[in-house]
Amino acid sequence: MSVYDKLQALGIVLPPVSVPAASYVPYMQTGNLLFLSGHIARKDGKPWVAQFGRNIGTEEGKLAARAVAIDLLGTLHAATGDLNKITRIVKVMSLVNSTGDFTEQHLVTNGCSELLGEVFGERGSHARSAFGVAQIPLGACVEIELIAELA
């Protein structure tokens, strides 16, 4: 089954690439590796502003990370022209806007990792880091970057 068939089965429509909020590009390819800049969680088209341990919980956070994954897929599609060219999701790095006592950043990030696994199957298995940070641009609750390998 193609990646696009899986997306359709999941009811996912790929968004266009977001316009960078600062001085950077949304993606950069070197050799067969594609590096995606950090994408922040959005809800209703606006930054999903919240801080874990204060006003958002882990389960809602998984939905935020899943939303980021959908945006990352839109950028991957724009960068490659065909998501089926991706041979592996290599690495995901997640920054989770957290209070000092929140310790479930890894569970929040599962929202992204699980969707990548659903869409790409074994090719979606990846190395990963999940960090708690004091703040993310625009007050967003989650920011995720990704590295993919192309055929």
Image (tube, grey):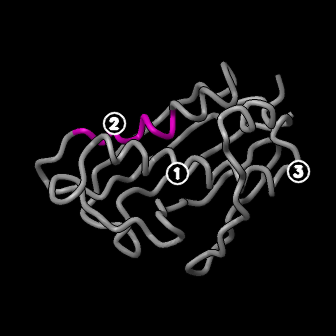
Other residues around mark 1 within 10 Å, as few (<14) / some (14–19) / many (≥20): many
- Distance Cα–Cα, label 3 vs label 1: 21 Å
The C terminus lies in which quarter of the figure? top right
Question: Residue 93: x and y, percent?
Answer: 48, 45
- Distance Cα–Cα, label 1 vs label 2: 16 Å
Question: Residue 37: x and y, percent?
Answer: 60, 60
Question: Residue 75: x and y, percent?
Answer: 71, 56
What secondary structure is found at the residue carrying circle 3?
Answer: loop
Which-is-in-front pick, marks 3 and 1? 1
Q: Circle 3 sits on which residue?
A: 81
Residue 74 part of the magenta segment:
no
Q: Circle 2 sits on which residue?
A: 106
Residue furthest out toward the top: 122
In the picture, measured across the screen, residue 76 lies left or right of residue 145, that is right
Q: Circle 1 sits on which residue?
A: 67
What secondary structure is found at the residue carrying circle 2?
Answer: helix
Q: Magenta stretch?
A: 104-113
What secondary structure is the stretch in magenta mostly built from? helix
CB atoms of marks 3 and 2 within 8 Å: no
In the picture, measured across the screen, residue 151 lies left or right of residue 118, that is right
Q: Amino acid at mark 2?
A: His
